[in-house]
Image: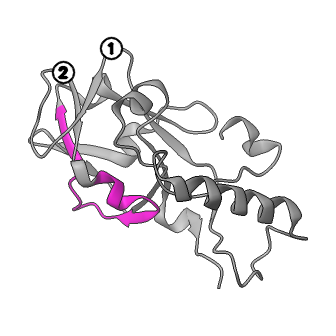
Amino acid sequence: MEISESMMPTVTIECGGAQDPESNLLATKGLNKYTTYENVLTRGHSDMSLEFFHNPIRLELVEGSDIAYGDHCLLDAGVTLLPEIEHFNFGFVSAETRLGFISGELRDCLQANDPDGKEKLLDYFRTVDGELYPVRRLKLFMVTTNPEIARKDCLFYLVEADASSGASD
């Protein structure tokens, strides 16, 4: 997603979970619309909901850090995200929204680089008594509760709330 940002738009079609048979149908339908609509990136399509995000940031594990999902801290060194973290997918979180728990130092567990490769983790996240919170209102997307995806790819993407534009009608 980050590589193509400067060259061309990237599309994400939210279609559900990998084990859901309806997801494949929804993904195919979405891709067909994306590739066949004239002026697909304009806000006039009544049968699609479009949101535009500029310069998304990936929240990733630092090498050597681990991830778990639970309602309390489960690791001696790493990140435990709340099991319901997926409920924030394509939604907003405020500075008061607890996202999970950090064992150790935040920077030893997570990284969040901007499209230019600059580390921005502390611009977006903080810890309070070992609990992980956003610094400000953020929009999260591509949130996963699959630890293997989180380890190999990322935990989720984020944009500042004012940097995302709303869905079309």
Q: Mark 2: which amino acid?
A: Ala
Circle 2 residues within 10 Å: few <14, some 14–19, many ≥20: some
Q: Position of residue 167 (x, y in %)?
A: 60, 76
Classify residue 117 by image quadrant.
top right
**Badge 1 is on which residue?**
64
Dot 2 lies on which element? loop
Provide residue 97's location: percent of width, then percent of height: 24, 60
Q: Depth check: give the residue in front, 32 or 50.
A: 32
Visible residue check, residue 15: no
Q: Are marks 2 and 1 in contact (CB under 8 Å)?
A: yes
- The vertical placement of 66 against 115, above or below, is above
In magenta stretch: residue 98: yes
For image coordinates 28% across by 23% down, the residue present is 66
In the image, 47 versus 67, the foreground residue is 47
Please name the residue shown 14% across and 26% down the image.
75
Segment colored magenta: 85-102
Within 10 angstroms of label 1, few (less than 14), some, or many (20 or more) residues? few
Q: Position of residue 13 (x, y in %)?
A: 63, 57
Residue beneath disc 2: 77
> In the rendered view of the protein, which quadrant contains the N terminus?
top right
Secondary element type, mark 1:
loop
On whether residue 75 falls in the magenta region, the answer is no
- Colour approach in the figure: one colour
Q: Quadrant of the C terminus?
A: bottom right
- In this view, which residue lies farthest toward the top? 64
C-alpha span from label 2 to label 1 = 9 Å
The answer to whether residue 45 is above or below residue 135 is below
Give the residue drawn at x 30%, y 52%: 85
Give whichever of 125, 31 is nearer the camera: 31
To which quarter of the image does residue 87 belong?
bottom left
